[in-house]
Structures are given as C-alpha cells and as structure tokens.
Image (cartoon, grey):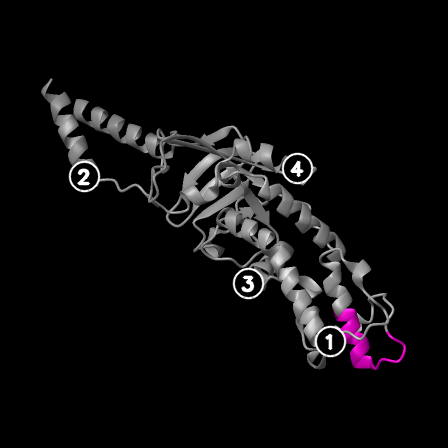
Amino acid sequence: MKKIILLFSLITLVGCSQFSSRKDQSQNIVFQNSVPQGKYNFTIISLNYPQSYSDKISFYKTLDSNLSNLNDVQANGINLLISNEMNKDFSSLLNTGWFDKEILGMKVVEDLTNDDVNYLNTITVSTPENAGNLQKLLNRQYYLLLQLTDNEYMYNSEFLYTELDKSLLMESVLLNRKSLIDNLNKIKKNFVYSMHNDIANAPLYSSSENINLKNFPNNPVIFEKSVNNSGFKVLSDNLIIFVGNGKNIYSTENYDFTANIVTPNSLDELKNISKDSTGISRILKWKRKEWRKNSTNENLEKKFSAWEEN
C-alpha cells in the first residue's frame, strides 16, 4: 500500500509540472551569434508612411537626415516595421534607386505605355507650344526628375529637352539619393515585416493574437501583440516574442525578452527610441537547447527504491 501511495504521488508531481506555468518551461534557447545572458527589449518603430508621391519625397528626405545623425550603436537599435507599401517602395529604392512613378522618368519616351502617358499628362507644367506629343512627354519626364531634388525652378517651358538631358539629370538624382540608400541598407537587417507581407526567413509582426503558425514555417522570429502574455516562447520553428505587458510572463533563467511598439510623432524621435532598444538581427539565428533524454520510469524507480529502503 505504501508503495502504491508513493508511486501515485510521484506520478502526480510529474504530471503537474508538465502543465504548470514554470518560468523556464520550453523556453530554453541558444544563439549562433554571441548573445550574452540578460534582459533585452525590442522596440518596434511603426512610422506613418505617406500615400502621395510628393509626401513620400518629403518623408524620405527627413528620414535620411535623421538616420544620418545616428551613430552605429543607435542605428543598430532601429527595428523598423515595414508595411506592404513601404516594402514595395524600399525594395525598389534599394534595387534600382527609384520608387513609385519615378520609373517613368527613366523610360525612353517611345517605350512609355498608355498608363505612363496618362500619368505624365496629369503633371501640371507648361510645354513648348510648337512641340509634338513625344517632345511634350519628354519635357514632363524632365520636370518629374527635377521635382526629386526640389529643382523645379530650373525647368524652362520653352526648352526642348532631350534623352541626354534626362540621362544627366537621372545621374544627378541617383547621386543625391545615395545617402538615403546607404542608410536604408544600414538598418535593413533589423526590418520587421507586417505579417501581410509575403516575406520568408525574416522577422514578422502580427497585431492579432494566436495566429496560425502553420502559415509562417520559415520565419525565425514572430512578434505577436498580446494583452495576456509577455516575454517569449520557443517553438520548434518559431521564436514568439509577445508585444505587451500581460500577466503571463515567459522567460528563461538566462534570457528575458520584452517587446513594445511605438509610433513616433516625428522622425526626430528615432535617436531617443533606439537608445534602449536591441536590434532584432542579434537573435535571428537560434535553436532550441538540446536536452539529454532520460528514462522517466528509471528515475522514478530509483527514487522509489531509495524511499522504500528507508
């Protein structure tokens, strides 16, 4: 009878520990990069990305100026939330130096599509009265490129611009944009993509709780907004970091990860925001800690035998 009671007690204790909210349960993790033990906060910056082209031009100029004022340590703390629209424009900028309708300025006028022509005709600018349709389109292309550098005043409505004039201006625009492209490349490693982006092998942010992780098998880190949870969980394929201050806290003895999302009123706030933030790129390469498998029955039997002898 004594043996049965003791065995039942051991099984009960083991069963309870499996489902209890132990602080270190299933959270053990090791990193490929050197990540010292301690507390880390990941601040995700959500920017109000403009919709109109002219507002985007202004946005990029301000963004470039503020990123240029950050030192390397501050830049490494910038985790920028990338929406669908931002991803499209950023990708185009980083790959070609152009974005949005700017590609229309690069095209040879004879290669313009009907949609391109319709858009260029919406640009309100005077063109030479004696010019043909192709020449008027060339002038509008040139004016579009002048807008990129705030040099519209240089436009001469009576001048017949050529493809060579346009080519020289495009080169000038790209040189002016080099700083922005360099700064975006510098912080690209810490981009956090909206879950609506179809991006693999990159961190994602979800504003919904309890997302279906089967849809994101190749995303190593997922930030999940939560009102109940805080900290992080390690699953077989995903590291889930909760964005919030919920009562259910998940961490390990070695690491304590927290996350929050902020929308600054001005891009001038980037420097202060990055001070207490860790770049997500530091923990993208991880794996669950391997545990040596022991026979539970053997351990119980040994413990039980020792108790029984007493």
Q: Is residue 175 magenta?
A: no
Residue 52 appearing in the image? no
Q: Position of residue 295 (x, y in %)?
A: 18, 39
Quarter of the image for residue 101 reads bottom right
Q: Main secondary structure of the magenta part?
A: helix
First in residue order: circle 2 vs circle 1: 1
> In the image, what residue occupies the spot 34% across and 37% down?
28
Cα–Cα span, label 2 and label 4? 58 Å
Cα–Cα span, label 2 and label 3? 55 Å
Q: Nearer the viewer, residue 111 or 17?
A: 111
> In the image, what residue occupies the spot 33% across and 30% down?
17
First in residue order: circle 1 vs circle 3: 3
- State the mark number for residue 268: 4
Q: Nearer the viewer, residue 246 or 298?
A: 246
Q: Which residue is mark 1?
A: 162
Tell us which disc is closer to us: 1 or 3. 1
Tell us which disc is closer to us: 2 or 3. 3
Q: Which residue is mark 2?
A: 295
First in residue order: circle 2 vs circle 3: 3
**Range of residues picked out in magenta:** 128-141
Within 10 Å of the Cα at label 1, are there few (<14), some (14-19), or many (20+) other Cα atoms? few
Element on which disc 3 rests: helix
First in residue order: circle 2 vs circle 4: 4
From the image, which quarter does the N terminus lie in?
top left
**Left or right of 1 on screen, residue 36:** right
Asked if disc 2 and disc 1 are in contact, CB closer than 8 Å, the reply is no
> In the image, what residue occupies the spot 54% across and 41% down?
78
Q: Position of residue 133 (x, y in %)?
A: 82, 80
Q: Is residue 260 above or below residue 2?
A: below
Q: Which residue is mark 3?
A: 95
